[in-house]
């Protein structure tokens, strides 16, 4: 049976089985899938089942409906497709009649696409008293630095990790470039210098 897995910042918040011919999605409480967020229209989109096929249709929403990064008006969904509405990502899972071996293969390939998901990562301290220590980035948001001097936040997103300045006059640098007000995507091996300490971002 097809289902939708709703997540934000990589954290799954609900799973919905598609059992009806018509499943509505939006901010208002009477929708079948309610997403309480201002980026989501009151009646945002509808999922229509026709036999084994599932079609997603945007209901002239304010911010649009995206499938695998592309804006759509109406589109058939396939197993592993990712629907994006505001900051929310909704994964469409439809096993159809495939056997368990094929199912595993489909799921694995979806995860292996470059940039499709944020893998395990850590910050390795390179200077100071804690040099050599690794801090795993297990939470959605990890703050680093010294309050009052400079604090930055590393946020885990579905497509990777970003770092942003939280407070402080001394701007952190990434590979020698000062960090501005906008979050910056981190790449494996990036060196962050913050409050006099050098750290390296390591992604597995």
Image (tube, rainbow, N blue to C red):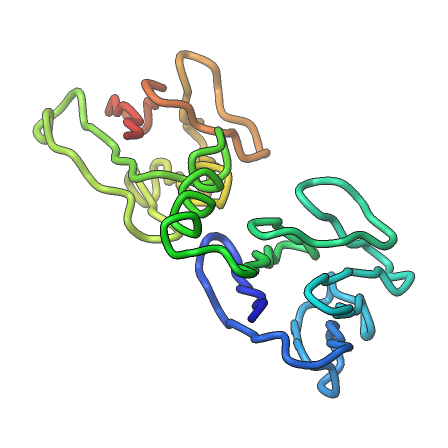
Which residue appears at 82% of the width and 48% of the height? 72
Which residue appears at 11% of the width and 32% of the height? 133
Q: Image check: 141 left or right of 40? A: left
Residue 29 showing in the rendered view: yes
Extreme right residue here? 60
Q: Image check: 59 left or right of 16? A: right
Q: Image check: 198 left or right of 171? A: left
What x and y, as percent, mark residue 185? 50, 29
Q: Indicate the quadrant where residue 91 lies.
A: bottom right
Count of marks, rendered view:
0
What x and y, as percent, mark residue 15? 51, 72
129 w.r.t. 100: above or below:
above
Q: Image check: 168 left or right of 96? A: left
What x and y, as percent, mark residue 68? 66, 42
Residue 153 showing in the rendered view: no
200 w.r.t. 144: above or below:
above
Q: Quadrant of the N terminus?
A: bottom right
Viewer-side residue, 75 vs 32: 75
What x and y, as percent, mark residue 99? 42, 56
Viewer-side residue, 110 vs 41: 110
Viewer-side residue, 8 vs 50: 50
Which residue appears at 33% of the width and 27% of the height? 194
Viewer-side residue, 42 vs 15: 15
Q: Quadrant of the C terminus?
A: top left
Q: Indicate the quadrant where residue 156 lies.
A: top left
Extreme top residue here? 176
Which residue appears at 41% of the width and 12% of the height? 176
């Amino acid at each position: 049976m097809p289902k939708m897995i709703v997540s934000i910042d990589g954290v799954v918040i609900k799973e919905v089985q598609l059992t009806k011919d018509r499943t509505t999605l939006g901010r208002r409480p009477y929708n079948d899938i309610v997403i309480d967020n201002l980026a989501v229209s009151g009646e945002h989109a509808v999922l229509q089942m026709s036999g084994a096929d599932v079609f997603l249709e945007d209901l002239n929403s304010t911010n649009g409906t995206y499938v695998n990064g592309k804006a759509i008006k109406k589109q058939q969904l396939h197993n592993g497709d990712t629907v994006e509405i505001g900051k929310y990502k909704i994964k469409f899972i439809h096993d159809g009649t495939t056997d368990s071996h094929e199912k595993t293969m489909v799921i694995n390939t979806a995860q292996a696409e470059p940039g499709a998901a944020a893998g395990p990562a850590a910050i390795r301290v390179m200077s100071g008293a804690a040099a050599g220590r690794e801090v795993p980035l297990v939470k959605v948001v990890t703050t680093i630095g010294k309050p009052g001097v400079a604090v930055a936040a590393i946020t885990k997103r579905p497509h990777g990790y970003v770092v942003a300045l939280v407070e402080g006059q001394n701007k952190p640098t990434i590979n020698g470039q000062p960090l501005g007000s906008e979050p910056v995507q981190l790449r494996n091996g990036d060196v962050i210098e913050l409050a006099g300490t050098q750290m390296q971002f390591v992604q597995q």
